[in-house]
Image (cartoon, rainbow, N blue to C red):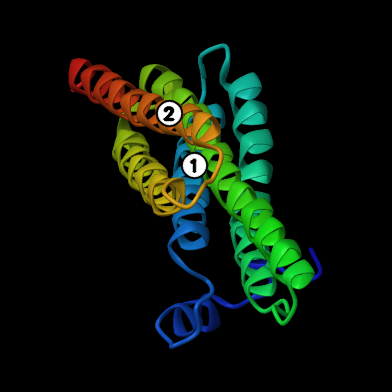
Amino acid sequence: MDKTLWTDTVEHLLNQTASANPTPGGGSISMVSAAFGLGLVIMALEVSNRRKNAPDGLSPLINEGRKILDAVRVSADADIDVFNTFMSALSLPKSTEEEKAQRKQAIQYATVKATEVPLSSARLCVAALDVATQAADIAHSNILSDVATGTLLLVAAGRGVLLNVDANLGSLRDRTLAEEYSQERTAQEVEFQKRASLVQQRLDARR
């Protein structure tokens, strides 16, 4: 990826999002939101780790969170990448039968990728929510609201990228593959809800 969202200023990113440009769109902005959601969880862990008598397990959890955060950052750019690939496929020539066949093949390839990338992003949101679940147990009580806020952003981000999956499933010619993706999509949404509920239960128990 030659270009990345992460070198933009926040103002420029917002202005681009609120413009007529097709990118950044729902998938990439969802993962930007996921990055900030996980960032809040990591912040809660970092602050907790600097306090006296910090509980064991904070440093490994922070390291795990940061690895996931790196992957989340990449996924935000990957969403734009696959969109551009799809648009390039649509612009291929279609004057001859051979060109039409090549164009159809390219569009299908791009559609598969445009389905796989948000599914991968959804898996990252689940992994980030696992960090939030553990943080709800061991972060300092004074900063649990940031864990809660981060969790809400992660769930919203996960659901946001799944909308991209929904948009592409009907265009997949391989219906067996489409059904496989559909089942994973449903399973991921269930996982979001499970983890969000678990975080809330653990936060409630500490109030």
Residue 6 appears at what percent x and percent y? 65, 66
Residue 70 appears at what percent x and percent y? 68, 44
Q: Nearer the viewer, residue 22 or 153?
A: 22
Residue ID at (38%, 17%):
137
Question: Looking at the rendering, in which quadrant would you find the C terminus?
Answer: top left
Q: Is residue 98 above or below residue 156?
A: below
Judged from the image, the secondary structure of the residue bearing numbered disc 2 is: helix
**Occupied quadrant, residue 80:** bottom right
Q: Nearer the viewer, residue 181 or 20?
A: 181
Judged from the image, the secondary structure of the residue bearing numbered disc 1 is: helix
Q: Is residue 4 left or right of residue 55?
A: right
Of the residues shown, which amino acid type is indicated by label 2? Ala
Find disc 1 in the rendering and name its residue. Answer: 38
Residue 193 appears at what percent x and percent y? 28, 27
Residue ID at (53%, 32%):
123
Find disc 2 in the rendering and name its residue. Answer: 132
Q: Please report contact status of discs 2 and 1: CB closer than 8 Å, yes or no.
A: yes
Of the residues shown, which amino acid type is indicated by label 1? Leu
Mark 1 burial class by Cα count in 10 Å: few <14, some 14-19, many 20+: many
Q: Residue furthest bottom?
A: 20
Mark 2 burial class by Cα count in 10 Å: few <14, some 14-19, many 20+: many
Q: Earlier in the sequence, mark 2 or mark 1?
A: 1
Q: Nearer the viewer, residue 55 or 29?
A: 29
Residue ID at (65%, 61%):
104
Q: Is residue 202 above or below residue 102?
A: above
Q: Is residue 58 above or below residue 8?
A: above
